[in-house]
Image (tube, rainbow, N blue to C red):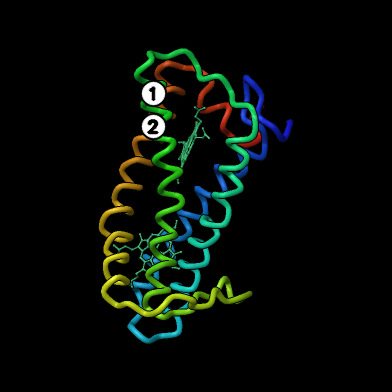
Amino acid sequence: MSARNSGQQWGWVAKALHWLIFLLMLAAWFAVESHEDFPKGSAERAQWMLLHKSFGASVFFLVWLRLYWRLSGPLPTPEPAPRWQHLAAAGLHWVLYGLMIFMPLTGLAASQFSGRIVSFFGLFDIPVFLAANKTLAGQLMGLHKEILWPLLLLLVAGHAAAALWHHFITKDRTLRRMLPFVS
Ligand code: HEM
Ligand code: HEM
């Protein structure tokens, strides 16, 4: 399978980035849910949060590569559908790109304004380089947890439902051509 996209198919780089970012977001969610099971101040709670932040920061690092790849290469032609569906899909995709940036960015910025160093899987630290601002940190956390996260859930549910609709109802290649190991 070719690395670059063609008119008919997503290349392996686009597929790998799509599914890797999906798995990283799932892992970030699982880690933050798991930290709730342990009491405040425990080593386990801190460890799950370290994983949450590290998976989340990985999304932030990878999305730039994904955007570069998306904007620099050819794209598969969308399967035939009414014009409004093409417009809705394209709009949704760009909002999802926005969320892949702003979901981790609000977490990282809140950590900055709380004066907390973020360790990336214990490999290196993202230092604090912004002055502490507890109010702003609280507002960014509110955005992270109360607005962006529910929005991401809603839009990914709609996006996945649309992919399944294409597969099972209109029976076209939209889902198949994004699946790994399917050519
Ligand atoms: C794609 C990336 C990310 C996703 C999907 C994500 C998702 C979430 C979710 C679902 C929660 C829990 C919301 C709730 O309690 O209702 C949360 C909380 C949190 N996230 Fe993230 N997050 C991401 C990246 C980050 C990053 C990069 C950081 C910091 C470097 C971060 C820091 C936090 C913190 C501090 C909390 C609060 C935990 C608590 O309430 O004890 N997140 N995030
Ligand atoms: C974190 C979750 C997800 C995010 C952020 C996400 C994001 C995206 C984005 C931005 C695109 C557009 C690619 C481009 O035009 O550059 C896309 C394409 C696609 N996604 Fe997802 N996706 C997620 C989960 C899923 C899931 C769970 C499915 C399947 C059930 C899925 C199926 C697809 C398919 C089939 C395409 C290709 C659409 C086409 O050819 O027009 N995605 N995804």
The image quadrant where one finds the N terminus is top right
For residue 87, which numbered disc appears in the image? Answer: 1
Are there few (<14), some (14-19), or many (20+) residues within 10 Å of tag 2? few
Residue appearing at x 49%, y 73% in the figure: 50
* Amino acid type, label 2: Gly
Q: Is residue 174 above or below residue 120?
A: above
Q: CA distance from mark 2 to mark 1?
A: 6 Å
* Amino acid type, label 1: Leu
Using the rendered view, name the quadrant where residue 147 is placed: bottom left
**Secondary structure type for disc 2:** helix
State the image coordinates of residue 6 (x, y, percent, origin top left). 66, 24
For residue 91, which numbered disc appears in the image? Answer: 2
Residue lying furthest bottom: 41
Disc 2 residue lies near ligand 2 with CB under 8 A: no
Residue appearing at x 53%, y 49% in the figure: 21
The image quadrant where one finds the C terminus is top right
State the image coordinates of residue 27 (x, y, percent, origin top left). 48, 58
**Secondary structure type for disc 1:** helix
